[in-house]
Amino acid sequence: MCGIVGAIAARPVAGILLEGLRRLEYRGYDSAGMAVLDQGQISRLRRIGKVQALADACEQQPLAGHLGIAHTRWATHGKPSEQNAHPHMSGERLAVVHNGIIENFEPLKRDLQQQGYTFTSETDTEVVAHLLDQELQHGLTLVEALRQTMTQLEGAFALGVIHADLPEQLLTARKGSPLVIGVGIGENFIASDQLALLPVTDRFMFLEDGDIAVLEADQIRVLDAQGQAVERAVTTFEHGQASAEKGEFRHFMLKEIYEQPRVMQAVLEGRVASGHLLEQAFGSEASAIFDQVKQVQIVACGTSYHAGMVAKYWIEELVGIPCMVEVASEFRYRPVVLPEGTLLLTLSQSGETADSLAALREVKDRVLATLAICNVPGSSLVRESDISLMTNAGPEIGVASTKAFTSQLVALMLTTIALGRRHGLGRDKEAELIAALEQLPVLLQQLLALDGPIEAMSAHFAEKHHALFLGRNVLYPVAMEGALKLKEISYIHAEAYPAGELKHGPLALVDKDMPVIAVAPRNGMLDKLKANLQEVRARGGELFVFAGCEESIQPEEGVHVIHLPAMPQVLDPIAFTLPLQLLSYHVAVLKGTDVDQPRNLAKSVTVE
Ligand code: F6R
């Protein structure tokens, strides 16, 4: 994934680059580096580890200069090491930072080696630096060299390039990887994400695939994939900068869990009025599209995939049309059958997830229409879909997704209502569902009051190595999400099962060292779930139950119960998620892991 940032300004840029990298650490954090042009020379500093290691090095060895590029890495080609850290250089006068993957780097590297280029890293990026140099040797300008180089690259990339002979220019290009230009006053910037640049600007320009931009301190020139000069719109950042700060919270993840009552309001705002959905929120073409939908195909990854699984239960129950859900990395590579009238619904917090984007591109011409539910306006997924609905959750910094998931669920319920209108979901039912959604801010506030008991419960997990999560029906995907949260931030191996599957295999694992977490709402499946829980108790397994009402399940020896407040049943998937988020959070804190930046992960997975 990696994060890139670059700046050209009248003031020294090293501090701007470092702050930008800190804000991009969610994209990867195994090494960091920067290259700054000062008095005709490029100075480069690289360090293994987090951005702080680079910041410490910059204290020892300050980098002056008004033009620079910087990078925080998530290793794909070559282990985390100083040699593999970006920026990469060709000679002493050209430096490059790259986010993405150059798929054909091996043949390119062989060719370059045959022509005498020496490689100092194992990365795919270094070929870009040498290809640029090769084109410059052929007499091209740097912009021409960049265009020529881009034609040779297969894969996805966002690039930042500086050259010691061009102290007034920062070059950038993108194809398939995210990149924004930050528009300042007498200074301009590039970054993988707007968040990186919020301290210096709130005005942003998004590049299209294949664009090259030349940034000078007081102008930006953009050339499209055909080399034609084009204008790209400048937009103002919508969320308050405060969202990118941790405030009084110990971790971003905890802050983002606590933001959920407010986020529930934000996702509903402007979308519902007087008990009705305002369908225009999906865009002016949405109504005509919804009229023709005969089935829905949802495609997403990770947490967003779990949200999609919840939607399958809702759409098939409340709309009565088929809904298929698949992880994007599988969907994109198989010959999928898409019956006539299919709405392709992609779900993504970032809108830049490589597999989800590829899935969209793969089939967009074969479906009725494409709908993106996404948290980042202007992201690739949103731009490339016919219609979209923003989740309005605000920037999510913690690598483990929390508020993005619950806001996706609300957006999915709004989508269910829009489709349901065409399939017999009456006005009364619509009003009932919306009234339930409107209770969410208060309900989630009440759920946050369970933080203390959940923290106490977390102590039982600190020494455990495995955990099982059980749910039935619409809470099965919620159990999956609970297991994902626990494994990614506490490194406890956790799996989720539909409770009815327990006796078909996983029960063999249950003993006193295998805590079993169950989500048990008050609905028709409760008695069946209770029977499954008995199966666990009978094998000595310790149970941790989140129960939907007082009467349903009582604590006893080996059975720990946290009761949730009463709520409309349709809210179960959203409401039961929050306690599971808190449980994972507290277990991770007890285990002392890096909650916001768990090992080996990155927030925005813009590579395959
Ligand atoms: C887990 C998590 C990931 C993401 C996945 C998809 O907490 O955050 O599983 O959900 O990488 O990312 P988006 O939603 O940005 O497409």
Image: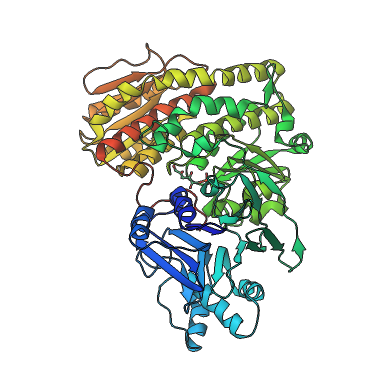
Does the rendering let one see residue 499? Answer: no
In this view, 366 is above or below 484: below
Residue shown at the point (30%, 27%) measured from the top left: 455
Residue 540, position in %: x, y? 21, 29
Left or right? Give the position of 505 relative to 228. Answer: left
Left or right? Give the position of 409 relative to 215. Answer: left
In this view, 580 is above or below 26: above
Residue shown at the point (61%, 62%) measured from the top left: 174
Left or right? Give the position of 506 relative to 203. Answer: left
Instruction: Give the quarter of the image for residue 494.
Output: top left
Camera-side residue of 171 and 378: 171
Does the rendering let one see residue 284? Answer: yes
Q: Residue furthest bottom?
A: 115
Residue 555, position in %: x, y? 27, 17
Camera-side residue of 133 and 157: 133
In this view, 534 is above or below 503: above
Residue shown at the point (54%, 45%) measured from the top left: 198
Residue 362, position in %: x, y? 64, 56
